[in-house]
């Protein structure tokens, strides 16, 4: 119970305290009798806590999932930068300095890096599918896209 309480945010603790205060005030106003108004207030509070508990974690990224996704995005950025360097080198050295074999080797490395970038992007999406499947589904269906 203590671990659960310590895991709550200040807002959640405040909301719980205000709800308990509302129950006590309802009890006092009702003259100290456990009549219908008090029972309704208690039932409403229990229902509110239940609903808050059910929806508290919806769409909330677990820190380990978020960390894994960010790690993949950093790797994706690193590979994209390496690919940019390879493409720039190949482009700038095409004025006769590279042989066809050397250019082919650079293009092979570039192709490999691009396939890694694609794989990393897919893995990052799958990480988010575990955390927030509805957001991924909306993007896949064409909603919330931000194509440049």
Image (cartoon, rainbow, N blue to C red):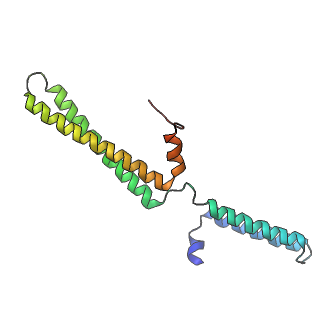
Residue 26 rendering spot, x and y as whole percentages: 85, 69
Query: Toward the viewer: 5 or 136?
Result: 136
Residue 133 rendering spot, x and y as whole percentages: 51, 51
In the depicted structure, whether residue 99 falls above or below residue 66: above
What residue is shown at x 12% (from left), y 21% (from top)?
95
Q: Quadrant of residue 82?
A: top left
Residue 38 rendering spot, x and y as whole percentages: 85, 71
Give the quarter of the figure containing the N terminus.
bottom right
What residue is shown at x 72% (from left), y 63% (from top)?
48
Give the quarter of the figure containing the C terminus.
top left
Count of labels in the image: 0
Query: Toward the viewer: 103 or 4?
Result: 103
Is 47 left or right of 120, judged from the image as shown? Answer: right
Is 135 left or right of 29, judged from the image as shown? Answer: left
Residue 60 rendering spot, x and y as whole percentages: 54, 56
In the displayed orientation, state which residue is furthest to the top.
95
Is 31 left or right of 140, judged from the image as shown? Answer: right
Q: Quadrant of residue 102?
A: top left
């Amino acid at each position: 119970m203590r671990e659960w309480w310590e895991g709550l945010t200040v807002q959640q603790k405040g909301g719980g305290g205000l709800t308990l205060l509302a129950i006590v005030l309802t009890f006092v106003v009702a003259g100290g009798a456990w009549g219908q108004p008090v029972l309704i207030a208690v039932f409403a509070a229990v229902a509110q806590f239940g609903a808050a508990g059910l929806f508290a974690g919806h769409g909330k990224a677990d820190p380990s999932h978020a960390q894994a996704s960010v790690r993949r995005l950093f790797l994706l950025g690193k590979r994209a930068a390496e690919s940019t360097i390879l493409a720039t080198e190949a482009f700038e050295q095409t004025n006769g300095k590279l042989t066809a074999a050397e250019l082919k080797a650079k293009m092979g490395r570039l192709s490999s890096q691009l396939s890694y970038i694609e794989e990393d992007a897919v893995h990052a999406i799958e990480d988010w599918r575990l955390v927030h499947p509805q957001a991924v589904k909306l993007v896949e269906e064409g909603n919330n896209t931000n194509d440049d």
